[in-house]
Image (cartoon, coloured by chain):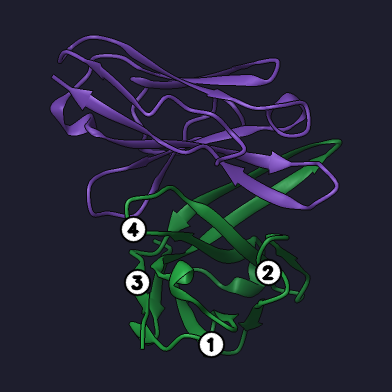
Amino acid sequence: QVQLQESGPGLVKPSETLSLTCAVSGYSISSGYYWGWIRQPPGKGLEWIGSIYHSGSTYYNPSLKSRVTISVDTSKNQFSLKLSSVTAADTAVYYCARQDYYGSGSYSYYMDVWGKGTTVTVSS
Amino acid sequence: QSVLTQPPSVSAAPGQKVTISCSGSSSNIGNNYVSWYQQLPGTAPKLLIYDNNKRPSGIPDRFSGSKSGTSATLGITGLQTGDEADYYCGTWDSSLSVNVVFGGGTKLTVL
């Protein structure tokens, strides 16, 4: 059974860098799939942040691209998110998820396994 | 403002059927596959439907998905109180910007 677990600071100061890690168990990241992050501000909907393949290729939400870095550590079977220059607008529950992406012409992209989420508050 | 448009809320009685719509454009729903997620209160989203109408293992056949043109629909039959949740549609957007987009979510109330 594939399981994902987020970890990282629950409080980050404005202008600093948010750093989260997602540990994967029950499946080797090197075996395939994309691995990424989605966030949900309090009382609001889902926002896709980005994803990474085990080879290191990445996709990022254009609205966050200048501030986001997603990396993978296959030796530890985990991947990470860094979001720089945070503001109060980055306060959210952050989920990591296994993501499937395939197609030619028409594409399928969905998240089939989710972590439980971790709350990050940006405040001084 | 979400790229995909969903009704903020729907409601129905136990045992009844409900549908939730998701409207987009040719760059997203019109040319790509749609997925649906259920988010029970205080929990992470859960995949209900992928590739427009496929159910992952363990999802009951009370849940169904369909797509027509630039719109998609989630159907739930035999409503149960445990189905009360927020439901989100999502898809790939093939516009100039690479992106995954979601609807704003629909709150289902089982009366």
Marks 1 and 3 on same chain: yes
First of labels 1, 3 by sequence position: 1
User: Residue, x 54% and y 29% (percent of image)?
Assistant: B5
Where residue A74 appears, x then y in whole percent?
Answer: 62, 83
Three-letter code for the amino acid on which mark 4 is drawn: Pro
Disc 2 element:
strand
First of labels 4, 2 by sequence position: 4
Where residue A114 appears, x then y in whole percent?
Answer: 43, 58
Q: What residue did someone put label 3 on?
A: A118
Chain B: drawing colour:
purple
Three-letter code for the amino acid on which mark 1 is drawn: Ser
Examine the rendered structure and indicate whether residue A87 appears above or below residue B53. below
Q: What residue did someone put label 4 on?
A: A42
Picture quadrant where residue A29 is located? bottom right
User: Residue, x 47% and y 67% (percent of image)?
Assistant: A89
Three-letter code for the amino acid on which mark 2 is drawn: Ile
Disc 1 element:
loop
Chain A: drawing colour:
green
Three-letter code for the amino acid on which mark 3 is drawn: Thr
Residue A26 visible in this rendered orientation of the protein? no
Side (left or right) of B111 relative to A54: left
Examine the rendered structure and indicate whether residue A74 appears above or below residue A109. below
Where residue A65 appears, x then y in whole percent?
Answer: 71, 69
Side (left or right) of A2 relative to A83: left
First of labels 3, 4 by sequence position: 4
Q: What residue did someone put label 2 on?
A: A52
Q: Are marks 3 and 4 in contact (CB under 8 Å)?
A: no
The nearer-to-camera label among 4 and 1 is: 1
Disc 4 element:
loop
Report in which chain the residue with disc 3 lies: A
First of labels 4, 1 by sequence position: 1
